[in-house]
Image (cartoon, rainbow, N blue to C red):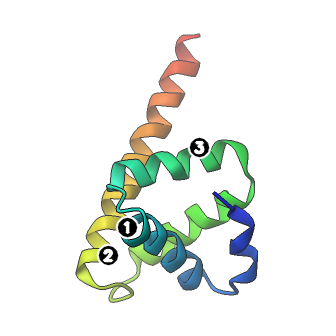
Amino acid sequence: MNWYVMTLMPSARERADWFVDIQLRRYCHSPKKAALRLWKGYCTEPLVRQLLSDLQQIAAAEGQLPAEELRYLQALLAHFDWLACQQQMRLSLS
């Protein structure tokens, strides 16, 4: 994924919309697959940390997204958290 496209977007809402739109509409990715994409980017690209913060901010704000997109984003973030927990468990066991 070209994460540098995000640098052209001035607001958290635009960055969140961009990511959800690409994952949901363009690629028809499930929330789990989108979370995996986000996780892979998070582990390799510093810019993705800002996107994660943006997604969390938008998901927490009332009325920012249509219901379908909000459910998708909440499921994506829940799976992202699960992936992060799995990684922490692996690291603590090694």
Residue on which the image places disc 1:
24
Quarter assignment of residue 14: bottom right
At label 3, counting other C-alpha atoms closer than 10 Å, the crowd grade (few under 14, some 14-19, many 20 or more) is few
Q: Is residue 72 above or below residue 7?
A: above
Quarter assignment of residue 9: bottom right
44 left or right of 52? Answer: right
Residue at horizontal 63 percent and vertical 49 percent from the top: 42
Q: Quadrant of the C terminus?
A: top right
Q: Quadrant of the N terminus?
A: bottom right
Q: Which numbered disc covers residue 40?
A: 3
Instruction: Say which label, 2 or 1, has the lower sequence index.
Output: 1
90 left or right of 5? Answer: left
Q: Residue 27: give x, y in percent of width and height.
A: 42, 62
Q: CA distance from mark 2 to mark 1?
A: 9 Å
In the image, 62 versus 13, the foreground residue is: 13
Q: Residue 23: give x, y in percent of width and height.
A: 44, 64
> Quick check: marks 2 and 1 in contact, CB under 8 Å?
yes
Q: CA distance from mark 2 to mark 3?
A: 22 Å
Q: Amino acid at mark 2?
A: Glu
At label 1, counting other C-alpha atoms closer than 10 Å, the crowd grade (few under 14, some 14-19, many 20 or more) is some
Q: Amino acid at mark 1?
A: Leu
> Quick check: marks 1 and 3 in contact, CB under 8 Å?
no
Q: Secondary structure at mark 3?
A: helix
Q: Residue 38: give x, y in percent of width and height.
A: 54, 53
Residue on which the image places disc 2:
69
In the image, 82 versus 25, the foreground residue is: 25
Q: Secondary structure at mark 1?
A: helix
